[in-house]
Amino acid sequence: MPDVRETKKRDSSRVLMMGNEAIAQGVLEGGIAYATGYPGNPSSEIVETLFKYKRSHNVCVEWAVNEIVALEAAAAFSFAGQRAVVTMKQNGMNVCADFLTTVCLNKLPGALLVVVCDDPGPLTSSNEEDSRHFAKIAQIPLFEPSTPQEAKDMAVAALNLSQKYGVPCLLRAVSRLSHGRGPVVTGPVKKNATPVYFDIDKPMVALPFLVTQNHSRLLGVMQAVCADFETDEFNTYSGPEDATTLVIASGQSAVYADEAIHVLNAENTVGLLKIGTVFPLPSQLIIKHLAHAKDVVFAEEVDPFLEEAVKVVYAENQFVLNTTRFFGKRNGWVPGVGEMNTTILVKTFSRLLGKKVAVESGIPEKLKSQAQAMLIPRELSFCQGCPHRASFFAIKTALKLDDRQGFLVGDIGCYGLGAGATGFEQIKALHCMGSGMGNLNGFSRLAALGFDQPVLAAAGDSTFFHAGLPALVNAVHHKMNAVFIILDNSVTAMTGFQINPSTPDNFPGAEQTVSIEKTAEGIGAITSVIDPVADLQKAIDAILKALRLEKGVHVIVFRHPCATYAIKKMPNPEPSVASIDSKKCLAKTCGCNQFCSRILNCPAISVDAASGKPCVEAQLCTGCGLCVQVCPQSAIRLKKAGDFEK
Amino acid sequence: MKQSINTIITGVGGQGNVLAAKLLAAAALADGWEVSVGDVYGLSQRGGSVASHIRWNRDRMMPPLVPEGDLDFLLAFEPLEALRIMTQYGNKHTVVVVNDHPVNPVGVQAGRFLYPDVEALYRLLEKMSKKVWWVSGTDTAKSLGNIQFLNTIMLGTFFATGQLGIRAELFEDAIRQTVPARYALPNIAAFSRGKALCSRQ
Ligand code: SF4
Ligand code: SF4
């Protein structure tokens, strides 16, 4: 694409930046006074990067309890004439949509930028939702960068546009861009000089009688934005002026399309129209290029968002345009699910152009199938010393002992792995933040229909505050019988160990702690706090007791810090390690059949090749002591790490 | 026509993949190449496979993903992961540098799977690729007193194969610029040890 190739070429000031770092740089250059968001892959590094510049650039940076609080807080900055950014992953858009679709009706004195990072063909998400639809729902401008450089530049442009028209803007990245790296030329960081002032004569309200009038104003704004977008430098065209085959692409997919055209040596026949300002779609630009195209192919992730918008423009202007054939997700020429890549587009383009593919043919099928036979999976697992291993083991044991086909419902986070082998396949329903706690409200009502399987719900500490509280209030209010287990590992581990309201105040960077147990008690739940790693039996008993009581709302907090976080940030000065006494261990002949390595499955316990007996890898063991408690032979003991050499 | 030099660094979460990719990309950028890196973040500390795609080329921006079957160089910190990437991205021209030390997946520890025969795995990699450098990276790192040096040792060997088109001095500069000062020298020493491992083959 000419824009990235030519303008920024060989500039010695180029630095390699992750897409998310580039976005952080962009919002600084765009003069933000406030940055917030809720952590979630692949978006977390934007706010994490901004934390580093908090002091030097005098920007207020903080994680919010959830996405809607984040957006509402950021909007207040824009109400007071300031610029603010909010970041989240795609699921977060659903959480903040209620506010987004109303605040768009007000004319903002400052600037408000929402950055969303989608996860197509998800690497770390429970769906592959396409957030671009929210631009259309709220009627706000949408930018889709295709390189880290563009991500940086668009963040600046989006903030400027937001202030120009007083409308929130949406910048949408995808995981490959957010976590990819490329060269970026940075610009100066803008000082925020606007006076901080809220004009009480211009209230920011979205009352029913104002809605149609404000909506009409917003549509007018979007027309003006559209006119700006017609000549926007983020929309580029490369290829012959009269190309009859046209690729229309946006975001990361535009770079795949560029490469696919190059691979097929089709630069002289195929045109590439890259749209960076995807909504409102610059229709005159589209018409100009549809005019020379006979065949149009779409490249975008994930939904046919651009495709459908282009088709609307085509339908509206059919009387001046040629007959055009369209190839995209809607007719199966491009996959409608999963992540895009160059290979997919090479296949689509070559099929359309009737070309043989000239790329490397890869590994011959025969060798591939030999390899496939060897390729065992590398499953994800709780880390060594992870408190969730103890919690899920306690849940599993309690449900077994209870013996009524009971099960656990949960949600996302490291503990989501509780649905897999590492968590003994305990979680039987898993969707979004806090969904297990909400589900349990319904399960507890099923008793009226004769449902007699006990159900437990698990949620993490950060999730409890993010989305779990309403479900708990609902359960108490309706006098349900329910057992909630809060897996409190003190940090938001999965997304990079962020501090959250439950983080104890002696942790580095922690702020005021909000007590889960006091909150739950205040709501009216019967509450207990247990360290499941220190006392596994107590954890099992607590669940069993709550299950057997069958009355009231119970909140059991399993509290033990994330092991990996603790090693990184708060290393124990006198660490212990487990060791297995091979004389006491009966291995295969023990009634437990090597329970510690086979079932407990701590990554620090492996099987010694020579003796066939389990052994602990001292380098990995965190000394959590969980294995010590499950060995029926008492063959496992904890020792001070230093004592081994002696 | 060859688009660009396509490299993948693969391993298991915690082996220093991301840093290795960052250093290599910084060196390539300093040597005047266009560079694009594709990383996977998020679940790395939970024992899964990780792969970083690093691509460099003289004159055009590339997507951060190597097209399937178009891999030039593979640097693997773990043999099974080498095979996994080779199967999807490799071809008969791929040059492979692989650490010979297997890391068992949890499923192997649990007895649900068997780790493939390492000798057979090595022979298969040789059949698939142009050349395999089978390197005792983990043992060397242990002899240097810290398993964390594995990535820079392996990068040393990788550079010593002499085909990357990036000057090794620039890689050492990248270490100095990226790694905290007190780790820079030991990492550069590890890099040199890695280079020596290549000449011993
Ligand atoms: S990062 Fe922490 S909470 Fe997550 S699996 Fe590892 S030890 Fe457990
Ligand atoms: S004490 Fe046992 S369970 Fe805990 S980390 Fe060490 S080996 Fe694993």
Image (cartoon, helix red, strand yellow):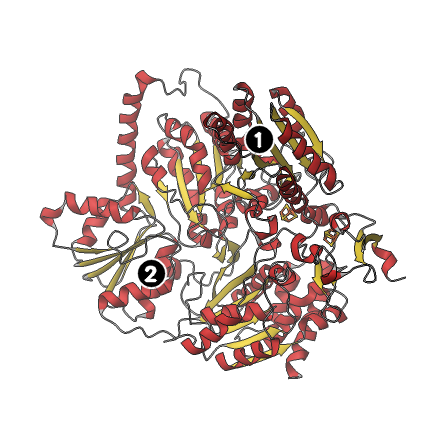
CA–CA distance in space, label 1 to label 2:
42 Å
| Vertical position of residue A560 compared to residue B30: above or below | above
Q: Is residue A137 visible?
A: yes
| Vertical position of residue B41 compared to residue A364: above or below | above
Give the camera-side residue of A176 and B26.
A176
Asked if badge 1 and badge 2 are on a common chain, one would say yes
- Relative placement, left or right, of A531 versus A340 is right
Residue type (three-letter) at the residue carrying disc 2? Ala
Give the camera-side residue of A132 and B179.
A132
Quadrant in the rendering for residue A615? bottom right
Q: Which residue is mark 2?
A: A257
SS class, disc 1: helix
| Vertical position of residue A72 compared to residue B131: above or below | above
Residue type (three-letter) at the residue carrying disc 1? Phe
Quarter holding the C terminus of chain B? bottom right
Q: Residue A43: x and y, percent? A: 50, 45
SS class, disc 2: helix
Q: Which residue is mark 1?
A: A465
Q: Residue A329: x and y, percent? A: 28, 53
Q: Residue A328: x and y, percent? A: 26, 55
- Of labels 1 and 2, the one closer to you: 1
Residue count near mark 2 (Cα–Cα under 10 Å), binned few <14, some 14–19, many ≥20: many
- Tell me what residue is drawn at x 50 percent, y 82 percent: B127
Which chain letter matches label 1? A
Quarter holding the N terminus of chain B? bottom left
| Vertical position of residue A28 compared to residue B5: above or below | above
Residue furthest to the right in view is A646
